[in-house]
Image (spheres, coloured by chain):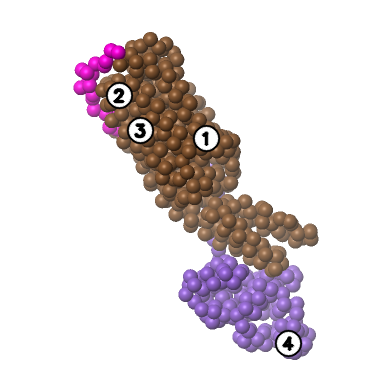
Chain colours: A purple, B brown
Amino acid sequence: MSPALRAQVLVGAAIVSAVALVGVYLAAGGSSYTPEKTQDPCEPRAWSNPQSLGEIANQFSNSALDGAACQLGVSREELARALATPEARERFTERYGIDDAKLAQAIRAGLVRAVDDAEDAGALSPLVGGPLRATIEEIPLDQAIELINNARTIFGDVQGFLGPAGDLLEELLP
Amino acid sequence: MSDAAPRPRAAALALAVGLVLADASIVVLALPDIYRELDTSVAGVTWVLISFNLVMALAAVPAALIARRVGPGRTAAIGLAVFAGAGLACGVAEDLSTLILARCVQALGGAAAVTAALELLPATVGSERRAAAVWAGAGATGAALGPAIGGLLTELVSWQSIFLIQVPVALAAAVPILAVARHEAATGILPTELRQTGRPHLLANAALAMVSASIAAALFLLVLLLIEGWRLTPIGAAIVVTAMPLAAVLGSRIGPLVPSAKARAAAGAILVSGGLAGLAYLPKAEVALTLPPQILVGIGLSLVLSALTETALSGRAPQAIHGGWTISARHAGVVIGLLALTPLFTADIADQREDAIEAGTAVVLDARVSPLLKIELAQRVGDRLEDEKGKVPTIGPVFEPLPEDEDERAAVVELRDELQDQLDRGATHAFSPSFLLGALLGLLALIPIGLSRRMDL
């Protein structure tokens, strides 16, 4: 093989190797190996078939977080982290310049959206949804946050959550 | 030239060159430890690398001129002594400023030793061509082995040991050179040679600078990805990056088969860029997937560095001055690479960490575990992220002990794996733009290589 041909073979082999490596890695998903994008909280979140009380409660919490986050213009994930501890909540309200009243208003709106979603998914009877909405509009911030964190109380203990009206409504749960 | 036997002197000179040029990269694997121990920032700790390379770039040509004036033997011996003394200072430094200052002094001594070595080698090994080959080979070996040796020392002993171990090695390399220094003192040097300096090979040196920037990106970023992103130990990372020097050995076997320096330089630059682009598009956070790109970079760096150094030195006298230019170009390239990449990947790491935390939170929220367990896990994950101060954490311990209920345990294990996957995705992707920039710098080297008429294809 002549020196000129060897030179061409070397450069050609380098190009082929480089292109092949990048091509194989791209084909294997190299360009999409990134953290998954989180969903826009203002978009409706589909409820999968609720199999258990715990799963219904999870989906209710997520819908409530979506609704509140949409109202505040933040992601559901950021709001969830903010509500994990009082310190995180304080940092969050300071960062966005909002007070507890505005936060409470957003969370109540989120809970109302969760009731709507639960009704749409058939997880909650409309007869329960009405009084629930009315109750949600009145509850204080800490209780609203607790409700997101442990939505099971709504579905597992309607009587406890709604008070005397719960006796009747519990009969009507699907 | 002197009474010292040529073989030990050649070995000492090669050792000196290898030692100094290894120092440009030897601290790469120690940077995470230095970062934590000296309580500094990522950008700050990068200056432990940048300072050395910057001073080498600035001092190489003046050091070569000094070597021509006062004698290469004396310059090399004094340079090695300064290098050893500054290495000691680096090893005992208790803050970043002292360490960086000592690194600057170390580079001054190193520049003197390396350029003077090139002046001494022709008489020692028999010809200028062979001297250039020994000099370039020793430098490439040192630069390639540096990170692995640094990683081993960091894990087995401490980051300080990287510098302290250089003290006896540098002094040992100086011993055979002392005979030359004594001979120079007795006989003097020839002043006529001082005026024979030709112009440096601009295109070869420009290409060297670009490709060195690209190689710095490969070494520096890969090590950070392995240790900070994928949580490997320094010794683990050292073993992984050994693939690059091993591939460089293979490249050094291929090189002699192709006489055209231009072809070797072009092929090398393409391979380095291809390897870096491969690292930018890793499809998973797995160590094995870094091996094919490393092999390309290793073969490429061997081909391109030897071809460009050979071209820059070929037919140029005096060798020390032109060797100084190549040292200057290579280290300037490393500095440019690090300065361009540091702000980019620092910002990307912060962004990707945020994205990974968002994605991880989404995984926790959507997980099929009880809400109360979710809250507890979320708090523990948050604490873990806080404790790691920007480093991507190993998330497994947060989930211990696993729940006893079989269904819940399966759900928690699934959650743990998904969460770790999101963090790994974020850590890996954070380096992609920097690897791509490194690849681009390597491709840019093709412009001066293509323009150079003295490297015939």
Disc 1: which residue: B161
The residue that disc 4 covers is A163
Residue B1 makes an appearance in the image: yes
- Read off the magenta span: B186-211
Q: Secondary structure at mark 2?
A: helix
Which residue type carries mark 2? Ala
Ranked by sequence position, the earlier of labels 3 and 1 is: 3
Q: CA distance from mark 3 to mark 1?
A: 21 Å
Question: With B87 as the anchor, is B188 left or right in this view?
Answer: left
Q: Are marks 2 and 3 in contact (CB under 8 Å)?
A: no
Return the disc, 2 or 3, that comes first in the chain's sequence: 2
Q: Quadrant of residue B304?
A: top left
| Depicted B450 relative to depicted A54: above or below | above
Q: Nearer the viewer, residue B189 or B349?
A: B189
Q: Is residue B447 left or right of residue B168?
A: left
Three-letter residue code for mark 4? Gly
